Image: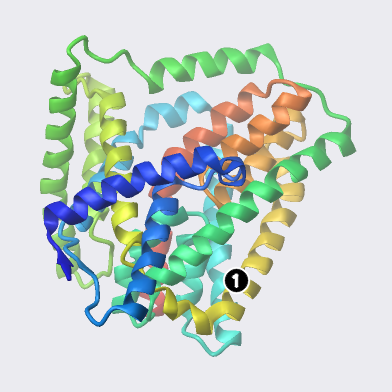
Amino acid sequence: MKLGLIETTALASLLLFLGYRARAAVPILYRLNIPAPVIGGLAMSIVVLAHRALAPEPLEFDTTLQRPLMIAFFTSIGFAASYRLLRVGGPQVLSFLLACSVLAVLQNILGAGVATMFGLPPLFGTLTGAVTLAGGPATGMAFAPLFEEAGVAGAGSIALATAMGGIVLGSVLGAPLATFLVERHKLRTGSESSAENVSSMAVVADPEPPADRSYAALKSLAFVLVAMWLGSGVSHLIERADVTMPAYIGALVVGAILRNLDDATGWLKLPHRAIDTIGAVALSLFLAMALMTLDLLKLVNLAWPLLINLILQTALVALICIGPIFRLMGKDYDAAVMSGGFAGVMLGTTANAMAVMRSVVERYGIAPRAFLVVPIVGGFFIDFTNALIITLSVNLLR
C-alpha cells in the first residue's frame, strides 16, 4: 500500500495535530518540551513497524516534499542570521556563540571516540554528537541522508534516538545546574540595564509586520523561494568543488546575505515574522514526514553505543556549564541562568533552554540578559555555525 504526495502530506499534517493534543494531554511531554511533530511522527513510525509485522504488503509514502520543506526551514534560519542582532546583543552573544561552537566540536570528538570504542565508524560519532545534540531533531533528520550515503546505516533512526535522549536530558539537567550555581554562590537577580538591552533587541528582532498580512505572507514566501532557487546554484557550485555539504547550505547562505543586505540598506523590507512562520511550518511538516518513515528496527543493535554516548555527552555538558560557561558569562545570577540554558541548547533545543530558564526565574527572579543571549544564539546563530562544523567533520571523516 502506497500513499501519494497529497495523502502523505495530509497525514503528516494530521500527525502534527495529534502531537499537539498528546503534549497537552500528557504532562511529562509538556514539561520536557517534546516537539509535537516528534510525538506524532514517532507514533506513526510505531504504527508502520506494527503494520510491517502483521501485513504482507508494506506501507509506503511519497516523501517528495520532504527535501524542499527541509531546505525552506534552513532558508528561514539564514534570514535570521543578522549581524545587527549579533552586534545589539553585545560581546556576551558572541561569547555564548563561541562557547556553543567549541562544545559542538568537542561533542563530535567525544562521539567519534565512543564510536571507535564499539568498532563503529567515526561518522557515527559525529551523527550522535553535534548533529543531533547541538542541532536537535531537525538538524539530525536533515543531515541523515548525507550520513546514509557516507555509510552510516539507519542514520535517521539513530538521529531521532539521540535527539530524543538529548531533549529529555537537557530538560532534566539544565534547571538543577542553574539552581546549584545560584545557591552555591548566593546570587541575586539581574540589573535594569539588561532589561533595557532586551527592549532594544526586541525592536531589532521583531519589526512591526505590514498591515496587509496576506501581502506579507506572499512577499515572505517569494523571498524564501528565491533564496532556495539561488541557493541551489550555490550548492551546485560547492558540489562541483567536490566538497560534501547538506542540500540546504546554499539557500541558508543566500538567506543570510539577503538579510544583512536588508539590514544595511532597508531596500527589501523583509517581513521577518512571516518568514519565521513559514520556516516553522516547513520544519513541522518536514519532521513529521521524516519521522513517520523511520525504520526503528535498526536501533536494536546500537542501544549500548547510544546509551554510553549520551551519558558521556551529558557529563561533558554539565562540567562545562558549572565551570567555563558560568565564568565566561560573568559569574553572576544571569550567568547561572544562562548556564542552565546552555545545557538545554547543547543537549536538546532552544525550547528546552527557555523552559529551563523560565523554571529558574520563576523561583529566583528575572534574568533579562539570559533571555537576551540564549534565544538569539540557540534559535539562530548556532544552527548556522553548527552546519559548518558538521560539514567539516563529514569531509574530514568520510
Above or below: residue 231 compared with residue 242: above
Along the viewing direction, whichever of 333 and 356 lies nearer the viewer: 356
Classify residue 137 by image quadrant: bottom left
Q: Is residue 42 above or below residue 206?
A: below
Classify 3 as above or below 329. below
Judging by the rendered image, the residue that carries numbered circle 1 is: 110
Q: Image quadrant for the N terminus?
A: bottom left
Please provide percent x and percent y for residue 248.
25, 54
Q: Residue at x 48, y 80 (%)?
A: 122
Is residue 391 among the parts visible in the rendering? no
Residue under the point 22% across and 24% down: 270
Front one among 238 and 11: 11
Identify the residue at the far top of this view.
Answer: 211
Q: Quadrant of residue 194?
A: top right
Q: Secondary structure at mark 1?
A: helix
Residue 305, given in percent of the width and then of the height, sits at 58, 79
Inspect this view and state whether residue 375 appears. Answer: yes
Quadrant of the drawing holding the C terminus: bottom left
**Residue at the extreme bottom:** 119
Question: What amino acid is labelled 1 in the image?
Answer: Leu
Front residue of this view, candidates 277 and 225: 277
The total number of labels drawn is: 1
Q: Position of residue 334 (x, y in %)?
A: 70, 29
Is 306 located above or below residue 368 in the figure?
A: below
Q: x%, y% of residue 161?
A: 50, 66
Mark 1 packing: few (<14 Cα in 10 Å), some, or many (20+)?
A: many
Residue at 72% from the left image edge and 32% from the top image edge: 360
What scheme was used to colour the molecule?
rainbow
The quarter holding residue 266 reads top left
